[in-house]
Image: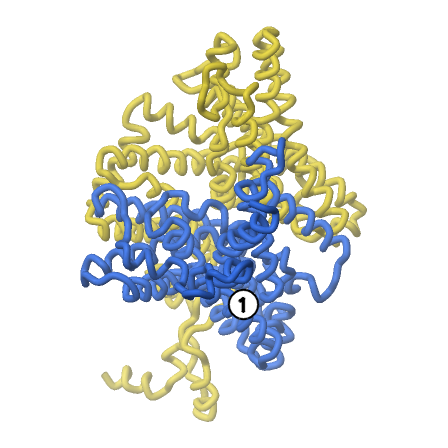
Chain colours: A blue, B yellow
Amino acid sequence: MNVLTIIINWINAAILAGTPLLLATNGEILTEKSGNLNLGVEGQMYMGAVTGLAAAWLTERWFGVGGIIPLIAAVVFAFLMGCISGLIYSVLTVTLRANQNVTGLTLAIFGTGFGKFFGEVLSNEAGGYVTVGAETKHVFGNINFGNLTEIPVIGTLFFRYNWLVYFSIIVAVILGWFLNKTRKGLSLRAVGESPATADSAGINVTRYKYAATTIGGGLCGLAGMYMSMVNQKGIWVTDCVSGYGWLAIALVIFSTWSPLRAIYSSIIFGGLSVMYMRVPIPGLPRDIYMMFPYIATIIVLILTSIRQIKEHAQPASTGLNYYREER
Amino acid sequence: MTDQKINNVNVQEQPKTPCPPAQDIHHQLKEPLVRMTKRGVVTTRQKVIVYVAGFILALVVGALMLLAIGKNPFFAYRDMVVGSFGTAIASAETIRIAVPLLIASVAVGFAFKMKFWNIGAEGQILAGAIFSSYIVIHSINNNNYIGRLPLHLIMVILAMVGGALFGFLPAYFKTKWETNETLFTLMLNYVAIHYVAYLQSLRSWQHPDSTYPKIVDFATFTNGKVALPRLFGVHIGWIFAIIIAVIAYFYLTKTKHGYEISVVGDSLNTARYAGMNTRWIQIRTLLISGALCGFAGYLQVAGANHTLTATTAGGVGFTAITVAWLAKLNPFVMIPIAIFIAMLQKGSLFIQSTMRIPAAAADLLTGLILFFMLGSEFFIEYKLVFRSKHHAPHIEQKEVSA
């Protein structure tokens, strides 16, 4: 294998590994744009992972069909479960005014427990371990582009992915357009920057916070489904999310709250996380490689705080609850 | 359910508002169905009622989840208590789980009181464990067995230095450039976890005959010198944990340092105007917070596990945050709560074997209880006022006629 092939294959693997990160990062960007710092992404992903797998598996079992219908069930229910988790967070922080950091961390603990709990229940139900049928596995596998796949370089770079890869990039583009080019996006950003100002301008702060956090949670749920349905190929693995939720929170900062920059930063992070398999540097142990994404985040955190670029900073009210009567 | 209970209480307490004049009817109709007002004085009884109601609701929701998977929740809850405190051995195991949890809770409590969101207890515990393991591995590899007491003293010092270092880094950058400490401490957790995985892969840290990436069992290699003595079936770390909680209470409430911490937490600007060196206060408190976590890491290595693994902290750092918050950052209250959470964890392991309920039930229940406690706080601080019937005269008239 020459160097070019290694690099091309590495990029391909990076994009595949970066896709759940991209989905979750976009979910968290949407959430944080409304001023909610939701640290529960890891838990939300676990909830989506187990729900998606359960939905696909149960659909196969109850209706005896494989393929596209279990896929739709997995997507819909994982998204809905993510939405529910976002809703729990919103009720607690927006309506009941609980501390955002603690609520998010609780969601992380709860969601992780939820995923592992029902994952094991599902495994017991299936008599050992859960696995979806070959047809369902196939629809979550790479799309068949026919001859396009065989084109040198371009085939591997662009046509050897599952549909969620393209879907997540489209979501990122739509989200970028929504935040920067639409009236509603402007209102949402206003809510995140200064809820009091937005409120006086007649924007319903509560509604925006709820909507953004709930849909953001749904995206995190989908990211979790990717972990169980694509990465683990429809088999329940107890540690299937394995810290990706925390990485997504870091990626939000790395991509400086921009859905479009999240595309390439998630690929970079995906690349860093599969680097030990693809680009072994002699003498550098695998576990040191695994630290790269986290150390990179710390460096980015420090650099952005030193440089203090206004438009690259987090929404001003992130992490703070809005009390209308204390305006 | 909580809402209604509380509202009933409040509606009774409210003085009856007189019937408004007729011309105000139009205005009154615009009043929202529910609005909230801040409570003036909250009695302890009200607080207890709200918290107990929240706790019961959490258990009810947990019971529903157990019912959903076809298990009897009453038996499950009963077995959790039996499995965690039914026998002396089980109780000892429960306390063993509670020890690092209590110390880490006290530690994050210090930082939280300053509104410094240290969620890196996990990493700080591991840092302590790594640093104190160095000296053990060093003495094993060089066949250089120093006495028991010196070994433990060096381990404790190294552990606290390691933990403090992991607390210092985010505090330094936060106070210098306002670097986000939540994510900084979070990332350090993973750096520590992967570093342990790296150490596990090192030949010099493994058992000579090992074919598996695992660090040696310290106790066998040092003739038990590393193992802490036991009292009542639990390694003596539990005594340290209680002493730490008591000292922390007095440190926070009775000393100048504690006062400074609460002022910085309430308002950084006030602290500055008062001439406090807020930067040093934050760094100092994080050094203490990190050092305490490091000490918990030492106890895990020397007392509980006698080795170092990537799960030496095992989620304690995250659970500690919930303990600290449930205790309202009061170190005394953390003692029973840490024991309670440890009971959930030990009890879950028990019902896993007796009832085939997944052990993750512990995390599920911990999360649920904290969700409801977080929600309860709202009902302690605020009360809901429903659109009063007295504002609508025609309804009142009906009541009169009836």
Residue B83 point in image, percent of width and height: 28, 31
Pick the front one: B249 or A77: A77
Protein chain holding label 1:
A
**Which quadrant does the N terminus of chain B fall into?**
bottom left
Instruction: Look at label 1 and name its amino acid.
Output: Ala
Q: Residue B100, image x and y in percent?
A: 49, 30
Q: Nearer the viewer, residue A308 or A263?
A: A263
Residue B271 located left or right of residue A231: right
Judge by depth and name the residue closer to the eye, A26 or B112: A26
Q: Which residue lies at the image location 33% right of the left edge and 83% below the top edge?
A: B396
Give the number of callouts.
1
Looking at the image, is A220 positioned above or below residue B286? Answer: below
Measuring 60% from the left and 19% from the top, which residue is drawn there? Answer: B155
Q: Which quadrant of the rendered structure holds the C terminus of chain B?
A: bottom left
Q: Which residue is mark 1?
A: A172
Q: Residues within 10 Å of mark 1 (few under 14, many from 20)?
A: many
Classify residue A33 as left or right of residue B274: left
Which residue occupies 33% across, 88% down?
Answer: B394
Q: Secondary structure at mark 1?
A: helix
Q: Is residue B22 left or right of residue A324?
A: left
Query: Residue sitting at 42 percent across and 20 percent down?
Result: B234
- Position of residue B278 in the picture relative to residue B119 (left or right): right
